[in-house]
Image: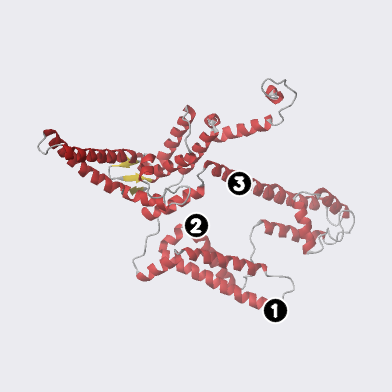
Amino acid sequence: MASAADARGIDLQPDTDANTYIIDNFNTVHKRSRKEGALVMLLTEDQRHLYGALKRVSKVKPAKIIPYPKNAVLLFFYKVVQHKYFETLTIILIVLNMFLMTSEHYGQSDSFVQAQDMVSLVFTSLFTAEAVLKLLGLRLYYFTRPWNVFDILVVTVSIVGNLLEKAAENISFSPAFCVCSEWLAGAAAETYLPRSGSFNEIVNFETFANSMLLLFRLTTAAGWNDVLQQIMASGTQPAFVCILYMSSYILVTFIVIVNMYVAVILENFTEAQEQELEGVTDDHIEMFYEEWSKYDPSATQFISLEQLPDFLDRLKSPLRIPKPNAVKIAALNLPITSENKLHCLDILRGISCVIVGNVEETDPLRKLQVQITTRTLKRFPLRNNMQTFTTTLMIRKEVKAAMTIQRAFEVASASETPHCPQAQGLEVSVLLLEKFKELVIHQTNL
């Protein structure tokens, strides 16, 4: 490690601590090896992209879509709530309701309060109607989605709150609530602190605005010791109360909330950046299975060979393979069952490999692929029991062979006499191949 830190380059004299980032690089590599395994460290950049893409596509399974109701009235509500603009309208209403909630201010008139209450009732009615429409259209399937359960819970709480005339008491255990709670505690304990030292006409707990500005500054742990020293020196509260107040606030806001949020944001940003480099993101996989559900509403994980060209054509970039796509489908070399069906995982993995590009096969990569396959078979037991009958590449070769023989027979039949034994034998063979070619062409939708 010491020699690596002193290294300046090939054929260059070492210098003390010339490579200042060797420790950080070592920690990064060590952390990655513990998280992903030692074999990942032996992969090249392109191989890691392929490994990440394959691991990601193996974690998601197709989901069943909510079936259409048989009743005509319920079918109408189903189409309404499943319309693409219905969700957009709901989001617009939520945003408008947020603006209404933020319009509350100090010293507002009675007429403004009454108008605000009326508009709040209107929004509550609209959200209730939205929940009722979904319940009618989706029936009991409404509760299979977590966001719907949260939605009906919020609507119920809003209705109960309006009936109890406590709609204004909208308190939640959020970071803003924690800060406001600290302001209340600070305002109650340190309102009458003398304006000296760190406290002046701006930095104090005398008003809500000044308190929030001071607490916001303390959220970054800037000058908290000066504020604590000034509070303790004032003698308005016992020393242990001042220490408990400041320590709890710094612990909750700075160490827990701020650092946790920053860590989550940075981690999500890093993961999203890695996915973009790999070429296949979670959004692409979600889009794939969203389109898949239209061809496989029962989530059997299989679609027929005849549906494959249309399905690939309807996908969005970068997964889309536009028509005519018979040659590209053959190049994917996808396995086909005896019932002429293909598995969703095979299709998605084949497209992902094309997006990542050609990657050199090495022993570590093969071992990691075996590990992915082992875990995948546990998530997709149907894929484990699937018996491969042929592949898209083999079917394409058989079709091309049949077409080549047919053209050769046409040339031979034009030059040979009808009574030639060789021509008669060739004619029988080609007739059989023609029947086979027609069947295969029908299957591949050429």
Residue type for callout 2: Pro
Residue indicated by mark 3: 269
Q: Nearer the viewer, mark 3 or mark 1?
A: 3
N-terminal of the pair, mark 3 or mark 1, is 1
SS state under label 3 = helix
Q: Nearer the viewer, mark 3 or mark 2?
A: 3
For the residues bearing labels 3 and 2, Cβ distance under 8 angstroms: no
N-terminal of the pair, mark 2 or mark 1, is 1
Residue type for callout 3: Phe
Query: Foreground: 330 or 418?
Result: 418
Query: Foreground: 380 or 194?
Result: 380
Q: Residue at the location (70% across, 78% down)?
A: 110
N-terminal of the pair, mark 3 or mark 2, is 2
For the residues bearing labels 3 and 1, Cβ distance under 8 angstroms: no
In the image, is 17 to the left or to the right of 441? right
The numbered disc on residue 110 is 1
Residue lying at the far right of the rendered structure: 196
